[in-house]
Image: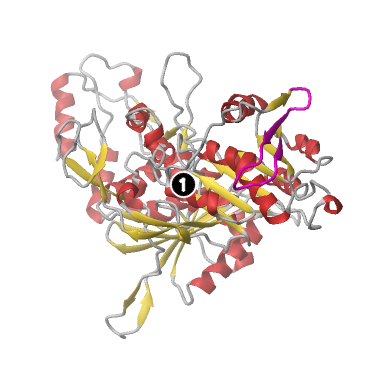
Amino acid sequence: MIYKKYAPCSPTLDVFHRCDAQSRCIVGPIGSGKTTAAIWEVGFNLPRRIYMNYGISETRWFVIRKTYDALMDSDFTEAMDWFSHGEWKPSRKLLTVKWPSSTNCPSPLIVHLKFLSCNTPEEEGKFRSQNVTGAWIDEANQLPLLSKQVVKGRLGRYPKQKDSPCGFVPRYFIETANPFPANHAMYTTYDWVGPKVLVDPAPQWRCTNRECQKTFSLVDHCPKCGAPGELTGKKDWRTGVYDCSVLEKKLPTNGPIPSIPPTPDHVGFWQEAGENEENLRPEYYDSVRRDYSEAPEMVNILVEGEPGDTPRGKPVYRNFDKHVHIAKAPLTWRKERDNRTGELKGVPLLVGWDFSGNFPAAVVTQKIAPMQYQVLKEFYNDRMQALDFGKWVLSSLASEYPGYEGIHYADPASWARYSSENGGFTSNAQMVMEYCGIEMTPSRNELDLRISAVDQLLLWRNGLLIDQQCYMLCNGFTAGYVREQNPRMGEKDYKENPLKNNFSHVHDAFQYSVVAEVYPKVRQPRPEIAEEEQLIAEYPERMTAYSSGPRNRRIVLDSAGVPVEPAYTPTHGAVAQGWDARRRR
């Protein structure tokens, strides 16, 4: 029997196989070798490691994916391609792979791979009655957390502890996935690491030719078409030197710092773009970039390997660029010294509130210069009602921004009154103001004006900067706050209003905080404007040159308020133009 050999071609896959953590995760772009690495991990590497450490020669593993069709078309096909000598039992969905003894492993190994799907929460019952050594979940970000917890409860139970030569059975849990949003539970579960960098990689360039857009390094012109290159702001990992025996902290490209510490003994590896490119067809990723030229967020996820969310429609804003408007480091509350007292005080905060619906949201913004704003924090909770949400937000503001001053802008619809259980009428805004002891100002509710205000800030240089921890706001710009496509065949048409979802509530709150500052209301016109408006109101209605019918006749009242017939009604164009001239004066 001839066995295929597998050797990792990237430093991330190398350290993934070397790591001893019992819970591991590997995330990377499409075509980065994640599936192959995981198949060899559960089908050969870990069984051999278990025998060398614990003397166990027979192990059983779950191979799980959301749908059974995807599981068989991808993971099972890949397993049969590498382990062609395995014995497949369709009735039990079990693939048995037997390995002979070798120099590095003196005992034969028996590996059982059980292929199961988990598309709905009800399907988790199929795992409760089975005992396995470990599990591998592919596209793990699509499975619910409860299903993963049930699977983890079945690990480390095959073989039985009394049948183990050392009286102990290890447990291993492996997850693989394409990049997911930074607010996903997996992002904070794992401690993201990578190989130690001995020599920093060189900057990466991209061809300026739109038809080429090839990436390269070490030269400033495209080696394919000769066009000049532009810096992408990234580094080409191929030009670096790494020590794969040592791990160090390594966050994903353009990924924020996790807000909570990782789960113990959970180690994650986030692959760089193009790590497996030498095993793919030439210009594989260049063609994918061209295919998704109208969806740049998909290029960032599938090719560049950056955290992000899949777009659900057409983005509402036109001028957003995640590499420009999302801060590379956490933002801080800006403070300025008072010119009169010399006291250092924080710049006033603009807090936008949206609690007119069932899911309250709030966004804290700061105006640091004319047409320059920074978003410091967002608040969103789909399990709180308005009063508890208001208390939570205000207590957080008091602890993080002590002594702050500012304006609380709210959705004007929040003042809509309805009958209360205690009698009388009330509104969400009134209840929050009374219960929390704050004053709120109605913002502007015109949707086109709110969207235009944000787009204006995005268009200005340094007009808007968003903190990395504002996950809902950042993902909404690129994927969640969108216009849904109309169900019309053959037409690329989108609905007028944005899709109502959890992203829209956060973006509405953000819009309320800035629209009143960018487009303030004119409460009282200047005296000369008021006089002119009064003069215009006294003019007769404009006459046409062709008709003097009822639509063009102006009703004239006498001193008693009784309509009278005018002696003469001007109908000619010259007379009408005379009225226009008087109006202009």
Q: Position of residue 565 (x, y in %)?
A: 33, 24
Query: What amino acid is found at the position of numbered circle 1 in the picture?
Result: Pro
**Which corner quadrant holds the N terminus?**
top right
The residue positioned 48% from the left and 16% from the top of the image is 488
Q: Is residue 404 left or right of residue 387?
A: left
Q: Position of residue 116 (x, y in %)?
A: 71, 32
Position of 66 relative to 395 (above/below): above
The residue positioned 59% from the left and 37% from the top of the image is 39
Q: Is residue 243 visible?
A: yes
The residue positioned 43% from the left and 13% from the top of the image is 490
Position of 76 relative to 515 (above/below): above
* Residue 385 placement: quadrant: bottom right
Q: Position of residue 63 (x, y in %)?
A: 67, 36
Q: Which residue is mark 1?
A: 307
Q: Is residue 415 visible?
A: no
Q: Is residue 425 magenta?
A: no
User: Magenta segment range?
Assistant: 90-112
Q: Is residue 243 left or right of residue 73?
A: left
Q: Looking at this view, name the residue that lies furthest to the bottom.
A: 341
